[in-house]
Image (cartoon, grey):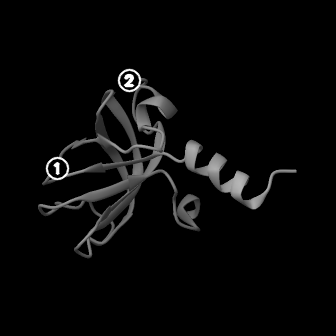
Amino acid sequence: MASKAGTKEVWEEMRVYETSETEGLGPLRLDRQAGSRSFYSAFGAGGGVDVFLYLVQHRDLNEWEAGTGHLSDAGTLCRDTVIASSGNDQPVHFSPGVKDITNNIYEGAYDA
């Protein structure tokens, strides 16, 4: 059985986490973060729409969006379907600043 420290280390290696400073409604250019898996290593590029779940959270503002998306290339997240957001469940026009992007989705996302 793995120790708690071992379990945390395994989780961090498996965690998909990147950041983006992209503004607006379009695709997000991803910046890989050391110690975490990239969306590309977890899901690959291409393959159509609605390939994986994502959560984008602006670090400084109350802007967030959860949905399904795909990668158009190794570093670009295409936001296909919004499940929930700070913009009345519509695509968010993200303001300047850093956004954290994971595929750790909140409880109930699959119920939307």
Real-space CA distance between mark 2 and mark 1, rounded to the nearest whole angstrom: 20 Å
Q: How would you rate the neighbour count of disc 1 (Cα within 10 Å): few for under 14, some for 14-19, many for 20 or more?
A: some
Q: Which residue is mark 2?
A: 46
Query: Is 11 placed left or right of 34 in the picture?
Result: right
Q: Nearer the viewer, mark 2 or mark 1?
A: 1
- Dot label at residue 83: none
Disc 1 on helix, strand or loop? loop
Query: Is 11 placed left or right of 99 in the picture?
Result: right
Q: Quadrant of residue 93?
A: bottom left
- Dot label at residue 22: 1
* Residue 73 coordinates in the image, percent (x, y): 30, 25
Front-lying residue, 11 or 64: 11
Residue at image point 58% right, 67% down: 108
Callout 1, which amino acid?
Thr
* Residue 6 coordinates in the image, percent (x, y): 72, 51
Question: Which residue reaches farthest bottom?
Answer: 62
Residue at image point 42% right, 31% down: 40
Front-lying residue, 24 or 33: 33
Dots 2, 1 in contact, CB < 8 A: no
Disc 2 on helix, strand or loop? loop
* Residue 97 coordinates in the image, percent (x, y): 16, 61
Number of on-image labels: 2
22 vs 60: above or below: above
Query: Is 91 placed left or right of 39 in the picture?
Result: left
Q: How would you rate the neighbour count of disc 2 (Cα within 10 Å): few for under 14, some for 14-19, many for 20 or more?
A: few
First in residue order: circle 2 vs circle 1: 1
Q: Quadrant of residue 89?
A: bottom left
Residue at image point 16% right, 49% down: 22
